[in-house]
Amino acid sequence: MKNILITTIVAVVFMGCAHSPQSNSKKFNSLNKSVHEISNGGPVESGPVYEGQKKLLSAFVKAFTDGDAEGCAKLYTEDTIYMQAELPIEKGREVVLDGYKKFFKSRTNKIIEVSEPIKEVISFGDMAVIRGTGKNIEETPQGVRIIKTYKYMILSEKQKDGSWQMKWDIYNFDADYKN
């Protein structure tokens, strides 16, 4: 029953987003095909899909911690959708790259630790949904430590070379961090 509910929710998300004014018929057909293949989806806790998601998140955490905008952006698909807390939706890898460049240039806090453990992976063949939590520990220039916690969900897409990239990325914080 749980798998049917998850499949139904993901199908509604896929279909709802496919009707956005920005989508063209080619993208709709691609998403529509994915919706019909959803019945084959299921949770995975090991294996190549799970390991691919761990590798994707590890690469992101390293690039983010290092302040590497290009390293972060290359982990997103060309047609990515990035939904950050309290910011407008970013569409496309180049827009995401620009956003990371601006963020890292303006970042004044020292990053002490970033972690994004996976809570669940649901595989749909060449697509996977990753759900998890995250924690950043930062230190202000005055030496004050700030711990930020958040929740995330990522739709990743397998690439021709076997790697995974983020097609959709969304997160929200557990508290108000306006420091």
Image (cartoon, rainbow, N blue to C red):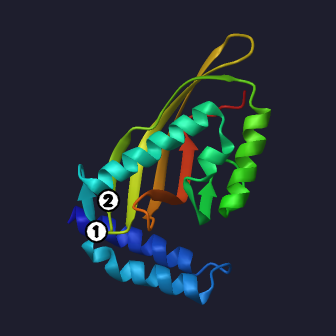
**Secondary structure state at the residue bearing disc 2:** strand
Q: Position of residue 64 (x, y in %)?
A: 60, 37
Q: Residue at x 40, y 74 (%)?
A: 11
Res. 89 in view: no
Q: Residue at x 74, y 31 (%)?
A: 107
Image x and y of residue 136, in percent = 55, 29
Residue extending farthest to the left is 1
Q: Are marks 1 and 2 in contact (CB under 8 Å)?
A: yes
Q: Which mark is residue 130?
A: none
Q: Residue at x 31, y 51 (%)?
A: 50
Count residues near mark 1 (Cα–Cα under 10 Å), then give few for <14, some for 14-19, many for 20+: some
Q: Which residue is mark 1?
A: 41
In the displayed structure, would residue 49 be above or below residue 32? above
**Where is mark 2, residue-wise?**
122
What's the amino acid at mark 1? Gly
Say left or right for 5 vs 84: left
Residue 160, x across and y down, in percent: 44, 68
Q: Characterize the local packing of mark 2: few (<14), some (14-19) or many (20 or more) Cα atoms within 10 angstroms.
A: many
Residue found 50% across the figure and 31% down from its top: 135
Q: Secondary structure at mark 1?
A: loop
Residue 64 drawn above or below residue 146: below
Would residue 133 be visible to someone looking at this image? yes
